Every structure is written in C-alpha cells, then in structure tokens.
Amino acid sequence: MVNCYVHAEASSVGTCVGCGKFICENCNTEIKRKNYCKSCVDELFDDSKRKIERLEDNMNKNQPMVFMNAGGASSSSSSSSSAAVGNEGQAFGLTKSKTTAGLLAIFLGGLGIHKFYLGKWGWGILYILFCWTYIPSLIGLIEGIIYLVSNQNNFARKYDPGFLR
C-alpha cells in the first residue's frame, strides 16, 4: 500500500484530483465526491476569492449606479425625471438636432440637404434628382414643420441613428 505524501507513516485513502498526490484520511477533503488535499483546496478557494474580487472591482469601476423607479409612486425625484432635467444632449445621447433638421428642410429641402444631415443618403439623392419639379421643396417644407413641431424624444427615436436610450 502507498503512504500519504504529508504523513509518511499513514496509508493513503486515495489521490488528490488537483495535484495527483497520495493522501491519507487526515489530509483528505471530499468536495462533490472528489478527493482533494488541503493545499489544493486552499488553492481552489484562493482562486475563487480572487475571481470574485476581480468581478467586484470591475463592477465598481465600469458600471454606473442606476436607480430605477419601480412604478406605483409618482415622486418627482425619480431617476427618470432627474435624468431628463439635466443636459439633454448627454442624457439622451442625441447626435442630431431637430431644429437644424427642420431649418435645413424648410430652406434647403428642395435639394434634400436635411436628408443628408439625417443620414438618409438615398432619399437625399432622390430629392436632388427631382429638385427641378419643386415637389421635393414642398415635401421639405412639410417635413421641416413636422421636425420643428415634434417632441425631442420622438424626433430622436425616429430620425437620429445615434440615439442612445
């Protein structure tokens, strides 16, 4: 019979799954029906502890703290209302201005400049191709009024490809 690698006088009851060394009854730690020596168990717990600490550090560094109103209570200090009160360009992730798009549509809508501004290149080219008919000018005037009258969130959701929300 083979003896334990720590206790030379004790006979082994099995081998450690982690390191493969023979272990006695005193050195054996059974986890999920597998035998481990005490040094391998310590190593496993240390690795797990380091992984948990790394995850906690990453969560603390990279993730902003977010509070959500679960509904029911209509308090004026909820996170959604406080985020909307701040700088709208940053709070909503806007990249296109509805005022700029509206003015471009009204004054240069016949050439489709507002469509190029909004990233709709195909429509912009179509407007240029038919600018001699004055139809794009009429459509541009209507679109400009729609842009200017619409809500900032609705405009961004519909026309702004960089809208983050």
Image (cartoon, rainbow, N blue to C red):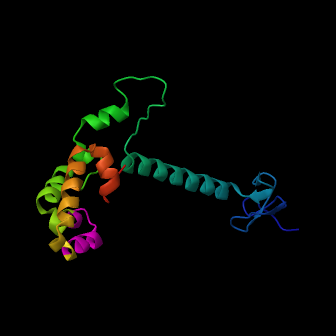
Judge from the rendering whether residue 155 lies leftward or rightward of residue 97; answer left or right: right
| Quadrant of residue 87 within the rendered picture | top left
The residue lying toward the viewer, choosing from 90 and 121, is: 121
Count of number-bearing discs: 0
Q: Which residue is at the far front? A: 133
Query: Along the line of sight, which residue is nearer the eye, 164 or 52?
Result: 164
Which residues, given as a range, are shown in magenta? 115-128
Residue sticking out furthest to the bottom: 129
Identify the residue shown where x is 40% and y is 39%. 66
Query: In the rendered structure, does residue 93 fall within the stretch colored magenta?
Result: no
Q: Position of residue 37 (x, y in %)?
A: 71, 58
Residue at 22% x, 54% y is 142
Q: Quadrant of residue 133?
A: bottom left
Q: Quadrant of residue 44?
A: bottom right
> Where is residue 131 shown, x and y percent of the image?
17, 71
Residue 153 in the image: state x and y as whole percent: 31, 45
Q: Quadrant of the N terminus?
A: bottom right
